[in-house]
């Protein structure tokens, strides 16, 4: 295989503005941070779903996490966000190890997770769904929350138009916007996206991919993007990591992975 070896991504700790290691969400907002997963072991009971996984994501970069069903992609995001415990290894946000922290602490540290399946609460209004994203905020003036909501409404116009409507009235693409906007309201430095294009029409999927690029370029977010659609993910990613049976089998620049015929044939399905 012509792809690079495990861990060939950008240097760890390469924060864009040099402000690294904050563990407090309020202090974390607006600063890019690298994410380095180092030798991560995690699983479910007897099942070892991640067996020494290393992924280096430079500050403000997009890393596509690819692989067949059951490769361990979702488990990787779950372990980084603290939903399941790392059994071994480190999860460095800038130079700060968050492995073993609770999901709430990890959100506060600056890592937001958008799980697969557009997890909106359909009975709640759009705005009530969005407010959930601010639950990790420490107490502060109401005006700050209102301003944060307005900032997201300015970016996501369809959500602004429907703010008082139940989330059940949204289309698939709008629901995806809602869950991403909700994650942004936690003011993350790292965004974990699990199959954001799943079930969307090609045109809407292209819009979601454009949005991901914007978030990385404009907000300096570091993004781990899990995708079944490897071609689309590699088209927007800086770097790609391919998992197979819980191990990294390739890690290289996205453009290099996209042209690796053997890799595409064996693991990526295009
Ligand atoms: P998919 O694209 O199908 O979601 P994936 O690459 O995200 O695949 P994971 O969902 O992370 O893969 O699964 C990795 C391994 O862990 C698989 O062997 C899977 O069967 C197993 N697994 C996932 N969730 C659980 C669970 N809740 N309990 C037990 N085993 C699980």
Image: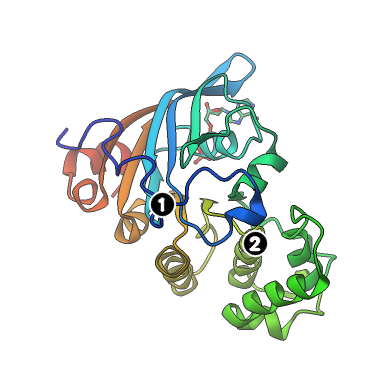
Q: Quadrant of residue 220?
A: bottom left
Q: Mark 1 highlights which residue?
A: 18
| Mark number displayed over residue 258 | none
Tell whether circle 2 marks a residue whose Cβ is less than 8 angstroms from ligand 1. no
Q: Position of residue 42 (x, y in %)?
A: 55, 23
**Of the pair 199 and 54, the residue shown nearer to us:** 54
- Confirm whether residue 69 shows in the render: yes
**Of the pair 49 and 239, the residue shown nearer to us:** 239
Q: Is residue 254 left or right of residue 195?
A: left
Q: Is residue 75 left or right of residue 185?
A: left
In this rendering, which labeled residue sits more in front, label 1 or label 2? 1
* Mark 2 crowdedness (10 Å alpha carbons): few <14, some 14-19, many ≥20: many
Question: Is label 1 in a helix, a strand or a loop?
Answer: loop
Question: Is label 2 in a helix, a strand or a loop?
Answer: helix
Q: Mark 2 highlights which residue?
A: 179
**Of the pair 185 and 258, the residue shown nearer to us:** 185
Residue lying at 41% horizontally and 52% vertically, measured from the top left: 18
Q: Position of residue 214 (x, y in %)?
A: 43, 70
**Of the pair 181 and 142, the residue shown nearer to us:** 142
């Amino acid at each position: 295989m012509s792809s690079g070896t495990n861990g060939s991504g950008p240097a760890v700790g390469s924060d864009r503005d040099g402000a690294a290691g904050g563990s407090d969400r309020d202090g974390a907002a607006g600063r890019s941070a690298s994410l380095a997963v180092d030798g991560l072991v995690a699983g479910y009971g007897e099942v070892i779903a991640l067996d020494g996984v290393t992924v280096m994501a430079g500050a403000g970069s997009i890393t596509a996490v690819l692989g067949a069903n059951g490769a361990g992609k979702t488990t990787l995001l779950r372990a980084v966000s603290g939903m399941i415990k790392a059994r071994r290894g480190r999860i460095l946000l800038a130079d700060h190890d968050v492995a073993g922290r609770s999901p709430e602490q990890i959100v506060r540290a600056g890592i937001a997770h958008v799980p697969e399946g557009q997890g909106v609460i359909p009975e709640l209004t759009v705005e009530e769904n969005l407010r959930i994203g601010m639950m990790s905020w420490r107490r502060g003036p109401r005006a700050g929350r209102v301003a944060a909501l307005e900032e997201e409404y300015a970016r996501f116009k369809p959500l602004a138009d429907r703010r008082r409507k139940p989330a059940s009235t949204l289309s698939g693409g709008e629901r995806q916007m809602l869950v991403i906007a909700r994650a942004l309201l936690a003011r993350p430095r790292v965004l974990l996206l699990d199959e954001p294009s799943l079930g969307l029409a090609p045109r809407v999927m292209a819009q979601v991919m454009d949005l991901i690029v914007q978030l990385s370029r404009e907000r300096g977010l570091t993004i781990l993007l899990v995708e079944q659609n490897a071609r689309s993910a590699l088209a927007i990613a800086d770097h790609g990591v391919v998992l197979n049976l819980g191990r990294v089998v390739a890690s290289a620049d996205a453009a290099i992975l996209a042209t690796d015929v053997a890799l595409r044939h064996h693991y990526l399905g295009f």
